Amino acid sequence: MNIATLRKKTAHWWRKEIRPLLVIALVLFAIRSSLADWNDVPSGSMKPTILEGDRVYVNKLAYDLKVPFTTWHLAQWANPQRGDIAVFFSPYDEKRLVKRVIGVPGDTVELRNDVLVLNGQPVAYQALDQKLLRDVAASDLDSHVFAHEQLPGRPHSVAAYPAARALRDFGPVQVPAGQYFMMGDNRDDSFDSRYWGMVERNRIVGRATSVVISFNRQHYWLPRWDRFFTGL
């Protein structure tokens, strides 16, 4: 095969095979960057709402539209609300985290012996429906205390881990304009705004809305079928 023939075949291969694949890959990555994505959850900081082995769907259009592959805003139509499960880049180490929005701009947040105090008012807690714990590991059921937290705007499940060393008393602090106070639902086992401060609005990627798929890491990665495509 001479050089001219080789060049012709290479050009044909580029036009017909490689270039279309690169265009498709670029479009898919742009969609993941700006429109929708999913996020693996490796830790238990959001138990019992989100478990280790869950993959959650991230709606990146929940609050705004960004330039693909950047955090630059093209348009903004909403802001995170108290109780949303937000995906954001940590101000501590730039890792992408999944936590709950506890305080919005203007809120005063405090924690007293693991009881959330919001704007001077202690939040109420109720017993948690045991059906919500069906996928929680037996070891966690033995070591944790679960409750239903009546967070204004969005009640949700929370957990406490009495045996852990944790920051159970905090604040009060006021959330500045353009920033948000994030906490994990597993209060005694979450590295969150109590430790590294508020999250600026431009660090927030989107809102986690559902569990897409789930695998039980403690049982040979077997699928948790009942968690597939369930809302958060």
Image (cartoon, rainbow, N blue to C red):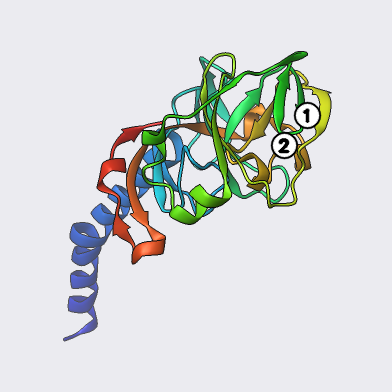
Quadrant position of residue 159: top right
Q: Which residue is mark 1?
A: 112
**Percent position (x, y) of residue 89?**
62, 42
First in residue order: circle 2 vs circle 1: 1
Dot 2 amino acid type: Ser
Residue at horizontal 78%, vertical 20%?
A: 176
Secondary structure under the numbered disc 2 in the rendered image: helix
Q: Which residue is mark 2?
A: 193
Dot 1 amino acid type: Arg
Q: Nearer the viewer, mark 2 or mark 1?
A: 1
Which mark is drawn over residue 49?
Answer: none
**Percent position (x, y) of residue 101?**
60, 27
| Mark 1 Cα-neighbour bin, 10 Å: few <14, some 14–19, many ≥20 | some
Quadrant position of residue 227: top left
Q: Quadrant of the C terminus?
A: top left
Q: Quadrant of the N terminus?
A: bottom left
